[in-house]
Structures are given as C-alpha cells and as structure tokens.
Image: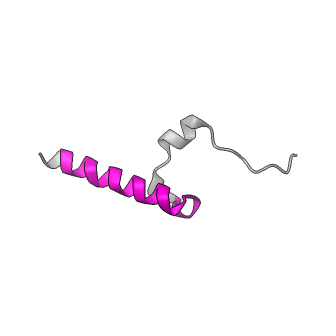
Amino acid sequence: MNNLPATPSPEELMTTPVFQAPETLSPQAEEASTALIAEQRQLRHL
C-alpha cells in the first residue's frame, strides 16, 4: 500500500463530470468550466 493520493488518469478526467467534484477545482477553473458549459448550451439553442 502506498500513501500517495490517487491521481486520476487523463481518461478519467475526461469522463468525470466537473459538477460532481467542484471542491477540487480552483475558482478560476470552476469559472472557466462554467463559462464553457454556458457556451455549449448557447450553441445547442442556435
């Protein structure tokens, strides 16, 4: 057993929804992801 925290693989990061773990994001990252989601929603409505 190692005591290192588990680091998610890039594949896991790509498939894990951001909104499930907001506490792991910095405010800047959370703001950027929120803006990206809003942009995607706008594109869907066009």
Q: Is 33 on the left or on the right of 23, as rendered? A: left
Image quadrant containing the C terminus:
top left
Number of callouts in the render? 0
In which quadrant of the rendered view does residue 7 lie?
top right
State the residue at coordinates (34%, 50%): 36
Residue sitting farthest toward the right: 1
Residue sitting farthest toward the left: 46
- The residue nearer to you, when weighing 18 against 38, is 38
Q: How is the image coloured?
A: one colour
Q: Is 37 on the left or on the right of 24, as rendered? A: left
Up the image or down, 21 lies above or below 11; here it is below
Q: Is residue 39 highlighted in magenta?
A: yes
State the residue at coordinates (46%, 59%): 30
Helix, strand or loop for the magenta stretch, by majority: helix
Extent of the magenta region: 21-43
Position of residue 45 measured from the top left corner of the image (x, y, whole percent): 14, 49
- The residue nearer to you, when weighing 1 against 26, is 26
Q: Is 43 on the left or on the right of 5, as rendered? A: left
Q: Is residue 41 highlighted in magenta?
A: yes
Position of residue 32 measured from the top left corner of the image (x, y, whole percent): 41, 54
Up the image or down, 20 lies above or below 40; here it is below
Position of residue 16 measured from the top left corner of the image (x, y, whole percent): 50, 47
State the residue at coordinates (41%, 53%): 33
State the residue at coordinates (48%, 41%): 15
Residue sitting farthest toward the top: 11
In which quadrant of the rendered view does residue 35 lie?
bottom left
Residue sitting farthest toward the front: 28
